[in-house]
Image (cartoon, helix red, strand yellow):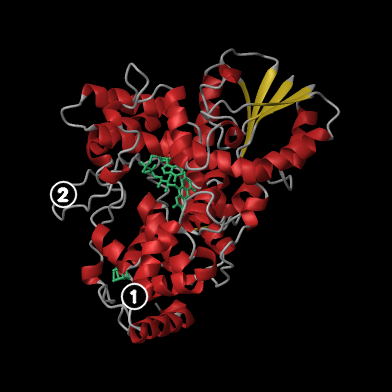
Amino acid sequence: MELRLILGDQLNAGHSWFRNTDPAVCYLLAELRQETDYCRHHRQKVLAFFAAMRAFAAALTKAGHNVCYLTLDESARWPDLPALLEAQIAHHQASSFAWQSPDEWRLANQLAQWAAGLTIPTAEVESEHFLTPRDGWQRYPHSRMEFFYRALRKQYKVLLDQGGQPLGGRWNFDSENRAKLPERQPIPAPLFFANDVQDIDAMLTRHGVKTLGRADAGALPWPLTRRQSRELLDHFLVHCLPHFGRYQDALSEQGWSLFHSRLSFSLNSKMLHPLEVIRAAQSHWQANQTTITLAQVEGFIRQILGWREFVRALYWEKMPEYQSTNFLGADRSLPGFFWNGETKMACVRHAIRQSLEHAYAHHIQRLMVTGNFALLAGIDPDEVDEWYLGIYVDAIEWVELPNTRGMSQFADGGLMGSKPYASSGAYLDRMGHYCKGCHYQVKARSGPQSCPFNSLYWHFLWRHRDKLGANPRLALPYANWDGQPEAQQQAVLATAEQYLIQLEQL
Ligand code: FAD
Ligand code: SF4
């Protein structure tokens, strides 16, 4: 008997392991306390992972495979994964053990170290999910995501003409991805699945698993199977893709996912393959070119073929050092309102409340609202990471860490992005509708009612001039700062200092 481990984010039905059934192979899936506890997760996230694992195990059994599934009730006897595996090897009298490469450094390291001490033959195999190998950083141009992305467009022949050139004559339609959402723009209703996971919810309560956020366990909205994931993909193609690129950067209280796909959980749990999603988007666009422009589909494909593969390559190249980078030396505590949404800043309140409610925020909320605030306020990246790793249904370290430490907090000093994603309130006002109803005044740079993003933005640039002053992409804002009258500069800095003292009260 060979025992093969499948981790909770390895629900890849297309893996070559499953091509044939073999009575001499047993697949092991286990709900693990070490996974519920390494960070405080959103309840919807734990429910979604365990429920999707159960559905995957049932599908494997139905297809004729031997499956050993351990619920938390059963696995709680062992303190961690190695102890559980040792017991299962003995129980199944396994003569060999195999596992798919974990995507997280933490688990990869734990399994490799443990397996090295085994006396039976072991094999680590590819997870067969990504479009680039783990050492992709070394194999592809990586100075910027754009070059990485172009190489992959060529390799996988995505959105290319017969001569291998980009369709539409451009690799990137980013400049067309920045429209503000018109007030009366209809937004498609998100597709929910209403999965009943009350048994898992009761089990989490029974075991005292500490989670955050809200969950309706009688109607969990996330896709839990490949079939539901494909349905969500189809829903996205028909209802959201026509406007995806245009409103990709938009912020609005009118909806919580706007034209975004909400496919990240299906992708990160591997129920969907990235190439399958990319090809489906390209085909749908090809068949509907009268209603969907190239800029919409390119904007979407770039996220999956470009950013998703790029962050994974960066993660594997730079771990484990990456998880403690802190280029800007940020050391303030994360304000308590990140955990309850109790803040007077309308934009931050909306992003946090919807994250607690839905275990989801779209990219620009994560980057330019909560992330931007944490960056400007100088919050310790360890605390920022902990929050992002816990709160989102799609949060797995390989993708969360480079996005949070790198892209959002500039803690890696510029590996993810060429400049910090820092902005004043003017950007948020331009891209969203929050400011009108906010306690703070977005046009005011200083004073007790001024938008905190304004003074904190200038304070951020001012206090990090030694590290950021020579960055050519920041030449304009620094010139703007230098051109401001000294009295105005002093008023802005004094307001920011006051806000930094009173972070909890903002
Ligand atoms: P869409 O906007 O519909 O995009 C389609 C897909 O593209 C996503 O499902 C995702 O797989 C991929 N994608 C888009 N942007 C990125 C990106 N920057 N990096 C990697 N993949 C991307 N994404 C996660 O999957 N897990 C995380 O834990 C995570 N943490 C983040 C933390 C911060 C601070 C920031 C700024 C971004 C983070 N992202 C993370 C990236 C991105 O915000 C989410 O992938 C996206 O919001 C998921 O929603 P969606 O499926 O509707 O995405
Ligand atoms: Fe956010 Fe400032 Fe606008 Fe308020 S005024 S919603 S804090 S950007």
Pick whichever of labels 1 and 2 is earlier in the sequence.
2
Q: Position of residue 300 (x, y in %)?
A: 34, 37
Helix, strand or loop at label 2? It is: loop
Instruction: Decide: is 505 above or below 352.
Output: below
Instruction: Choose between 413 and 472: the one closer to the eye.
Output: 472
Q: Is residue 206 left or right of residue 300?
A: right
Q: Position of residue 396 (x, y in %)?
A: 54, 45
Q: Is residue 337 left or right of residue 437?
A: right
As drawn, the label of residue 483 is: 1
Q: Nearer the viewer, mark 1 or mark 2?
A: 1
Instruction: Decide: is 448 above or below 260.
Output: below
Q: Residue at x 49, y 50 (%)?
A: 403
Q: Residue at x 78, y 34 (%)?
A: 115
Q: Residue at x 42, y 27 (%)?
A: 153
Instruction: Decide: is 305 above or below 262.
Output: above
**Tag 2: residue type?**
Gln
